[in-house]
Image (cartoon, helix red, strand yellow):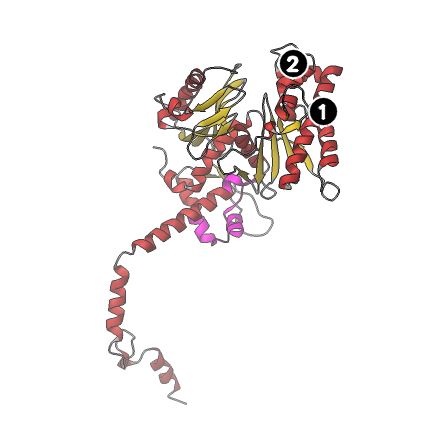
Amino acid sequence: MAGAPEDVRGAVRSPASGTSGLPADDPDAARRTRHGRAAERVPDPVRARRQEHLREHNLSVTLAHVVDATSPPSRAQIAASTGLARGTVTGLVDVLIEAGLVRELDPVSAARAGRPAVPLAPAPGRIAGVGMEVNVDYLGVRAVDLAGGVLVERVEQADLRGADPGDVLDRLAALAGPLLAGLQTDGVRVAGTALALPGLVDRVTGPLRVAPNLGWRDVDVVARLAADPVLAAFPPRVANEANLAARAEAHARRGTGAPSFLYVSGEVGVGGALVLDGEIFLGRHGWSGEIGHVVVDGSAPDGPGTLERLAGQDAIAAAAGLPAGSRFADLLRAVEAGDAAAVAAVHAAARWLGLAVATVANVVDVGAVVLGGTFGHLYPHVEGPVRAALDAHVIFAPWSTLDVSRARAGEYPAMTGGALAVLRQVVAEPSVWLTPTP
């Protein structure tokens, strides 16, 4: 038993093994180890690319958790939500803070013992997406930062029906160019621009195919805007205004899981968008959501009774007996004052709206409807007729009642949605933005 300690020590390191710690009876072990270490020193481009991709993915996931949070998360909360190691999250957050994408807020004392948690929030005023819009009765530009704040906006009211596309786009450039230049002068990094249009936009080839209420057809809007020296550096992605407004609405409803709903935007025209698990369903060409062209009255004597013809702003104003050229504010005042003709016109439009929404619901099995634009402003007056039409015409209503609610995204949601669409690219590829502004 006296020799046992020596036996144990010998098992750890036998003199016969040499200083390498390799077994003495394996003369090829040292050669294999040397070759293995040499092989490890040879750069492996595939492995390097995988590591870069993994780092980009982890940066994106971390930044998304900060940007999408309804209350500022801590590093520990991000680690718990993502499954990433706490040390990994700490390193990623430090990189995002240094780049000016994320900031730390004041520490919050925890209920239990330990260091106070440090909440994280998107850095305001550092990077902006710019949303632009041309609609039938206005055009505008809005810059939104990663924190969701509106940095600056310009809106010009105008009747653009039948206006020359080139002239309108030049007016838009006259609004957007100085705004973009001002952001850069103020040290804000512009991530890009997006343009909302009230019509069919081909997401594959780019041009506006048709905007019936503007009277536009096959217009290459990007080429026209690129003629502006400032916008040439920020050519816009182009999308349907209802789809971008729905994106803003989905962002406003985040925090309780990925939202799914049918969004209906009432303007002079009527647009719609289907949101599934927080993402816009665009369809094969990007032409989905044209609910305004659903025929709800096939017996109309002067042609198909589309939802737009029966429930658009102009149609409601005409039915209310308002003078031609009246603004929506005039209609809203008449309704709120209890004018019988105006109230009856709104209720009739709401019934047509409910019928169109019921048709869509029966096809796609949607569970929630969000009313924006005109219908959002008139929500107290349209909610009841819309619900009644859904109860009467949606086949699954007895077992699953559709939720109807008012939009939350605020005024000009398509501009906000365009800016948010641009900023999602920053979240998707944060490494492009890791060099802070000088």
Give residue 354's position: percent from left, percent from top: 69, 30
Choose top left, top right, bottom left or bottom right for residue 11: bottom left
Q: Which residue is mark 2?
A: 330
Whether residue 49 is situated above or below residue 146 in the rendered picture: below
Residue 63: assigned label: none
In the image shown, does 216 or 174 lie closer to the viewer? 216
In the image shown, does 54 or 168 lie closer to the viewer? 168
Range covered by the magenta-colored residues: 66-92
In the image shown, does 228 or 63 lie closer to the viewer? 228
Farthest residue to the bottom: give it.
Answer: 1
Tell me what residue is drawn at x 50 percent, y 41 percent: 66
Q: Quadrant of the N terminus?
A: bottom left
- Neighbour class for label 2 at 10 Å: few (<14), some, many (≥20)? few
> Is residue 48 a member of the stretch shown in magenta?
no
Judged from the image, the secondary structure of the residue bearing numbered disc 1 is helix
In the image shown, does 173 or 361 lie closer to the viewer? 361
Relative to residue 189, is residue 293 drawn left or right? Answer: right
Give residue 64's position: percent from left, percent from top: 49, 42
The residues tagged by marks 2 and 1 sit, at their Cα atoms, a distance apart of 16 Å
Callout 1 amino acid: His
Of label 2 and label 1, which has the lower sequence position? 2
Give residue 282's position: percent from left, percent from top: 52, 37
Residue 350 is at least partly visible in this image: yes
Judged from the image, the secondary structure of the residue bearing numbered disc 2 is helix
Q: Which residue is mark 1?
A: 381
Q: Quadrant of the C terminus?
A: top left
Q: Main secondary structure of the magenta part?
A: helix
Whether residue 342 is situated above or below residue 25 in the rendered picture: above
